[in-house]
Amino acid sequence: MARLEPLQPPYSDAVAGELAKLAPIALFRTLAHNPRVLGRVRRGGLLDPGTITLRQRELVILRTCALCGAEYEWGVHVAAFARAAGLAAAEIAATVSGDRAALPGADDQALFALCEALHRTATVDDALWDQLAAAFAPDQLVELVALAGQYHAIAYLANALGIECEPGAPRFRSTTTYLWPVSLS
């Protein structure tokens, strides 16, 4: 059950201005209780084209959300981005189970290791860093760590505020089949 109900229209001018730039999902409408925080989250996002591929971005987001138990945000990202990122059903399921054998390459497996290390210890040991540095440029390494951190914060918000899963969004327990497209609007 939601601890804070997502705002419903009519919105204040400040909230309407922020929400007009975002999908009308429960996360953003809940954050709209504090328009300043909503605006900061919107402007601080890393969903724009960056130095990493869409696939890499979504693997990091999905694994981080799964590690944090953030089913809401995980489901939103599966519905909105997994298909475009080219993620197969087994790879999506692996973001929940942690089964690295379901991932096709060492770079994907290293991304899971990065998420798990940051989640567990808030740092990366030298051996993993060396593995990542062999596969990713310095600007990509910064983006990957920042992305995992950002989605820890989003997980905190979704979990602590009790945001209920979007209707029709995939759930952790349904990680074996996905029907495309899933619409959250």
Image (cartoon, grey):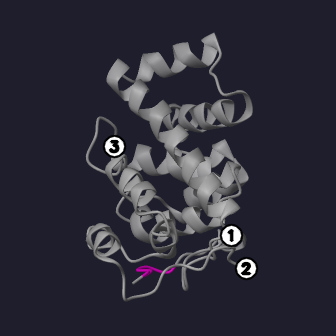
Residue occupying the point 54% across, 84% down: 168
Instruction: State which region is magenta.
Output: 179-184
**Does residue 175 appear to the left or right of 131 in the view shown?**
right
Residue 4: percent from left, percent from top: 63, 74
**Does residue 80 appear to the left or right of 73 in the view shown?**
left
Distance from the alpha carbon under mark 2 to that under mark 1: 6 Å
The residue carrying pointer 1 sits among few (fewer than 14), some (14 to 19) or many (20 or more) residues within 10 Å by Cα, namely some
Q: Are marks 2 and 1 in contact (CB under 8 Å)?
A: yes
Residue 118: percent from left, percent from top: 64, 31
Q: Which residue is mark 1?
A: 162
Mark 2 or mark 3: name the one nearer the start of the chain: 2
Q: Is residue 29 above or below residue 104?
A: below
In the drawing, what numbered circle is on residue 1? 2
Q: Amino acid at mark 3?
A: Thr
Disc 3 or disc 1, which is closer to the eye?
A: 1
Residue occupying the point 72% across, 27% down: 121
